[in-house]
Image (spheres, rainbow, N blue to C red):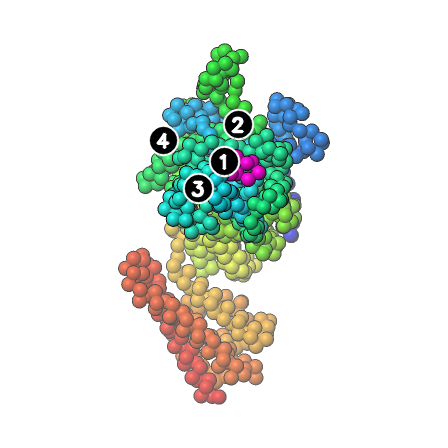
Amino acid sequence: MTEELKMPTKYNPQEVEAGRYDEWIAKDLFKPSGDMTKKPYSIVIPPPNVTGKLHLGHAWDTTLQDIIIRQKRMQGYDTLWLPGMDHAGIATQAKVEEKLAAEGVSRYDLGREKFIDTVWEWKEEYATFIREQWAKVGISVDYSRERFTLDDGLSEAVRKVFVTMFEKDLIYRGEYIINWDPKAKTALSDIEVIHKDVEGAFYHMSYPLADGSGVLEIATTRPETMLGDTAVAVHPEDDRYKHLIGKMLVLPIVNKEIPIIADEYVEMDFGTGVVKITPAHDPNDFEVGNRHSLPRINVMNEDGTMNELAGKYEGMDRFKARKEIIKELEEIGRLIKIEKMVHSVGHSERTGVVVEPRLSTQWFVKMAPLAKEAMDNQATDQAVNFVPERFENTYMRWMENVHDWVISRQLWWGHRIPAWYHKETGELYVGMEEPADAENWIQDPDVLDTWFSSALWPFSTMGWPDTEAPDFKRYFPTNTLVTGYDIIFFWVSRMMFQSLEFTEERPFENVLIHGLIRDEQGRKMSKSLGNGIDPMEVIDKYGADALRWFLSNGSSPGQDVRFSYDKMDASWNFINKVWNASRFAIMNMDGLTVDEIDLTGPKTIADRWILTRLNETIEHVTNLSEKFEFGEAGRHLYNFIWDDFCDWYIEMSKGVLNGEDETAKLTTRSILAHVLDQTLRLLHPIMPFVTEKIWESVPHHGESLVVAEYPVVRPEFNDETAAKGMEVLMELIRSVRNIRSEVNTPMSKKVELLIKTNDPTIEAFLIENQHYIERFCNPETLTISSDVTAPETAMSAVITGAEIYLPLAGLINIAEEITRLEKEMAKWDGEVKRVQGKLSNERFVSSAPEAVVESERAKEKDYLEKREAVAERINVLKAQA
């Protein structure tokens, strides 16, 4: 039985959404069905960082996932959407340290254990915020399976991976130049460095030859590192300097001798062709130093201040030391010039400070064999399907050029590296558990890069390394990952190579890549611009469904989307239209029960047409959703609901509903109930709250739309004759309305209407359905015949199979009517050109489905007839003029 109507006259999202999510959770509707006869479908959520509250990008990301999983659940899959959060090592530690600093406390004051306890408190606070936001957006995750990248199970997986990779020689420890964040005092991987163009300078200096025979000019952007120079290099083929190779220079300020070496790394035609070599402070110099067995002198502390090897500059900040060194070089006559320039400088993604290339002993992942395995997999039938596919090239290019991955971080918050050093012998032990005689060993103080654990997310969350874990066996590999293009390198690529290495399976079948949300001007949202939008505030104003509708329809896969409140207004208006149409339909069902619905009775042309259009919409929406084309799917839904159902069918149904024929009334009520029910099911994955609310008042079986069956095409309702007939009828009604509008003749004023038919089938159809013409065109007299003679002074229009004339004496300016018809002629010229262009394309004709080609040929015939009729009418009017 349908419930008593409880729908206010205006859609109120706050009332509609209140308490609904809690009901779904209480009924366990988001958990997998457990039905092993169903096909599994799984998604793991990209775990948000516990660093703050969710932004619009998260709302977009989760909305797309929710649309996919809700639709699959309704389609009868055994669905799992697994939620979770990321500990986000450096980002979270930086936030907590900022909070402590405001209280006048540092992590060192607390000590490691107490500091980590403080971060756990932060994590619990922000995890609660995130869950509240997930609920507000309406995402249908299974909270009973929620995971965290630092929970016990994931920690075990991380240790297993580290130990296994170490034993396979895929993880090693070595001294290399790495990206160093002096504020966070930790190593960074290459992709955690953001390059920005900043104003800088080339500082030209002279280094004197030790024998007093001259000087060499050298330029650098980082003069503070000169204190660690251990050589100067020239190209071995550079005739200017060949005679100097092997000689010694005096390093200014430090006043020690360093050699002039030859190395092909030097570009002869760049600058002076002479390069200072600082192996401890530059990655290229490090390689040169290795080739020439040069010492490595690190002149900086981990916080970016100069150390004891910097002499008098010890303790000074690196940038202050730069100024002081330049000042001293000038004083001793060794500064030649300062050349201002703009150059690209690396900054820490998390703390924003300038990154320092620094010699450091770190743990690395050997990437070459892992990258090869991942790239080779893309040539198999187990390849990950990138949507849009162009992003596969982005992935492959990065894999081809990948460097070894520095995975150790000098932080306290994160997965502690499972490596221990013997207190006396220095022996290294790597294992799942600490050594038996733990008191004789010291654990490596570093933690692992956040991405090391999140790279395991699709399978570690399912119970791996226990390969017999029920979820791992049932739901892995996952089906679809949804994420932004900005973390293809950070995360997507790492999940792919780690999954292949440890499970011999791809982590997901599809990866749907979306863009970024920008402001109305196309700018990236940021704190500095102050243009960020809080999705929770948007929901408070417009409701979650309106935000979800906007986010699902905003763009096609891979494209950025611009947020605007005008678009949110349009989203709310659309839902309000759905609300009011539903309210009308429910009010006119007159207490109809689900068992009383009867779709077998005699049907009007409008009945047969709306059922046909419903089938077409189901087919389009389902197929487009399979391709993740949610914007296009939304467009079809919008057009069907707004134009077909609301503007046409509901209006046409009023005549029957207000009539006396009870059999016809039952059919119309049944069709209203059926179409509304099916439409709500189609809409539910996108706007779950309002559809569930309305559905409660529609005759239905089942407890919730969440687990209701998704619509399928019912071939018995396809009626091509009705579809074509209604197109003619709608075209006729629109044409009459347009003509009335052009000459300011309101619909309430009765007019003479002549319809000259040139197709007997259409003539019969129009006569059979003339009650619709009378109702929607309001003619004083109506003539439908092939014998109609065109009046001399009449407004006219050409439709498929007929010409329309409205003799509006005294209201027509013949010259203006000719101009209007010439515009219409140009329109049909364009349509003819377009369709003939398609049909003259041999590739289209030979490769397109036969039905598509035939449809284009039918259009060509229709457009040619319309163009000819307009041309004839123009000639008649010109003759009168």
C-beta proximity under 8 Å, tags 2 and 3:
no
Q: Give the secondary structure at mark 1.
A: strand
Other-residue count near label 3 (Cα within 10 Å), few / some / many at <14 / 14–19 / ≥20? many
x, y percentage for residue 671?
A: 49, 52
Q: Nearer the viewer, residue 163 or 842?
A: 163
Q: Nearer the viewer, mark 1 or mark 3?
A: 1
Residue 522 appears in view: yes
Give me the C-alpha separation between circle 2 and circle 3.
Answer: 38 Å
Give me the C-alpha separation between circle 2 and circle 4.
Answer: 27 Å
Q: Which residue is mark 2?
A: 447
Q: Which residue is mark 3?
A: 233
Amino acid of disc 4:
Glu
Q: Mark 2 or mark 1: which comes first in sequence? A: 1
Q: Which numbered tag is attached to residue 257?
A: 1
Q: Nearer the viewer, residue 307 or 442?
A: 307
Q: Is residue 851 left or right of residue 489?
A: left
Other-residue count near label 4 (Cα within 10 Å), few / some / many at <14 / 14–19 / ≥20? few
Q: Which residue is mark 4?
A: 504
Q: Residue at x 38, y 59 (%)?
A: 720
Q: Nearer the viewer, residue 61 or 231?
A: 231
